[in-house]
Each structure stands twice: as C-alpha cells, then as structure tokens.
Image (spheres, grey):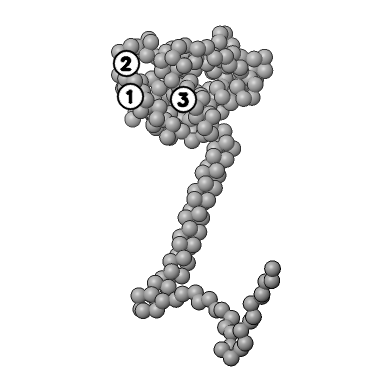
Amino acid sequence: MGKRDYFRKGTIEMVVLSLISEDDLYGYQIAQAITEQSGGTITIQMGSLYPVLYKLRDDGYISERQVPIGNRKFRVYYHIEQSGKELLQDLILEHDTFEVGLSKIIAPRRTRHQEDRFNE
Amino acid sequence: MNDVLKQYFQEIRKLLLCDEKQKNRCIAELDADISSFLESKPNATLDDLYAAFGTPQSIAESFLERVDPEQLSHKVSAKRKIAFGVIATVILLAIALGITACLYAEDLHDFFSGYYVDDIEYFETVPSNAEPTPSPIIEY
C-alpha cells in the first residue's frame, strides 16, 4: 500500500472489512475502491490483498460466493459476516486509539519537522 | 495478449510460495480479476497490466509478506525434506553402483589377465575295480 508499506498490522483488514460492509465486492473491485476512495494516495497490490482475504475467510469474518463469468472462470465475491462486523468495530477503535497516541508524539514536533523539510 | 497472460500466470505460479491449493485459488481469482480489468480497458498493454496488478515478482513478494508465517515455515520445511530425500537417494544409489562396479571390476581384471572362473560341479566317482551294479531282471 502506497510507496512505503508502513502500515500497522490490521490496517488492510480494517479497510477491506469497511468496504465490504457496505456491499459484496470481488478482489479487483476492492483494490479499485481503495485507490479511488483514498484519492489515489493508497494503492494495494493484488498480491497483498489475496492473503488478507483468505485469512479473513478462513477465520470466518467474511464468506465468499463464486459467480461464473464464462470460459471456466469464476469471480469471487466477498461478504462480511457478523463476526467480521464486530472485528471491524474493534479495529476502528484500535486505529483511533493509535492515531491519538501517535499525534501526541508527532504534533509538538510537527512545526520543526516541517521547517527541516523546507530547509532541505 | 492471451499468450502474454499465460506466461504471466506461469511466472506467478513458479514464484508463489504457498500450498498448491492456495496457489491455484490465487491464480484463478487473479485470472478473473484481470478479465474484469481487461473488460474496462480492452486496449491495455502488458505495462498497464503490471501497473494495475504488479509484475509476477512483485505479486509473489507482496503475497509472501502477508502469508501466515506458520504456513510458510511448513512449506519451506516440506521443500527441505524433499530436497534431503532426493540427495540421500542419489548418494545411496551412487554408493550401491560403486560397490557393484568394484565387484565386477575385480572379475573383469581377472578375465582380461587370462583367468576365467567357472563353476565346477563335482560328481561322485565310482572306483574302477568295483563290481558293476547288476541291473534288475524282470521276468514276465
């Protein structure tokens, strides 16, 4: 995701669950939605997305249904389960708590960091 | 583009480090997703495909970062066991061939040096001054 993959564990899971909580989506749709809704600031490689989806499915947070699209191909739509909705709430809470803690560290030093960047 | 896609999936299959079931699943799903991408961009080039989905190497790398470490260690452990088994079999075969070659080499050396070893059957010999055993007379 993005140029540098400096995301906390659980961030991609939170984003994926958030998207499919509104509607069932397939892999490429999820990746497209992440790029479009973040204004292009966040992109995710399909190679990163699939293991996340498989793990969520294996743990029962999401389920899947296969829709044939002709020529022996099938599209896999993912659907959030009740346990997935609960996990999403937990992840959002964790994320918000983390953001508050992070901003307490960065905020007092933000001006100096911005000046350093300006002087480079 | 079909040949290009075929090669693309073959490369990914070679590079993905996960169990066969998950590999097949990943590639089938990628195939369907790429079909969706090509429906929206029928004139897409290989570069467009790489930009949207990644090169086979980047797909395999990003997959590796997210796969369950326990599953990965099982896969690596299984590969190591197979490699060890193959190497051990080759070594044992080499030793067996070596021993067989040594045994035959000795016989061949003797043969080419003029010695010929054959099995000799010993028969029980009858002394010449012994009386002949009378043959039975059948009376009708």
Q: Position of residue A46 (x, y in %)?
A: 45, 23
Mark 1 Cα-neighbour bin, 10 Å: few <14, some 14–19, many ≥20: few
Which of the marked residues, 2 or 1, is nearer the chain's N terminus?
A: 1
Identity of the residue drawn at 49% across and 15% down: A74
Residue at image position (50%, 59%) is B92
The image shows residue B85 at horizontal and vertical percentages of 52, 51
- The three-letter amino acid code for the residue at tag 1 is Val
Marks 2 and 1 sit apart, C-alpha to C-alpha, by: 12 Å
Residue that numbered label 2 is attached to: B44
Q: Is residue A25 visible?
A: no
Q: Mark 1 points at which residue?
A: B4
- Left or right placement of residue B6 versus residue A20 in this view: left
Residue B104 is at least partly visible in this image: yes
Q: Is residue A5 left or right of residue B7?
A: right
For the C terminus of chain B, the image quarter is bottom right
Q: Which circle marks residue B27 in the picture?
A: 3
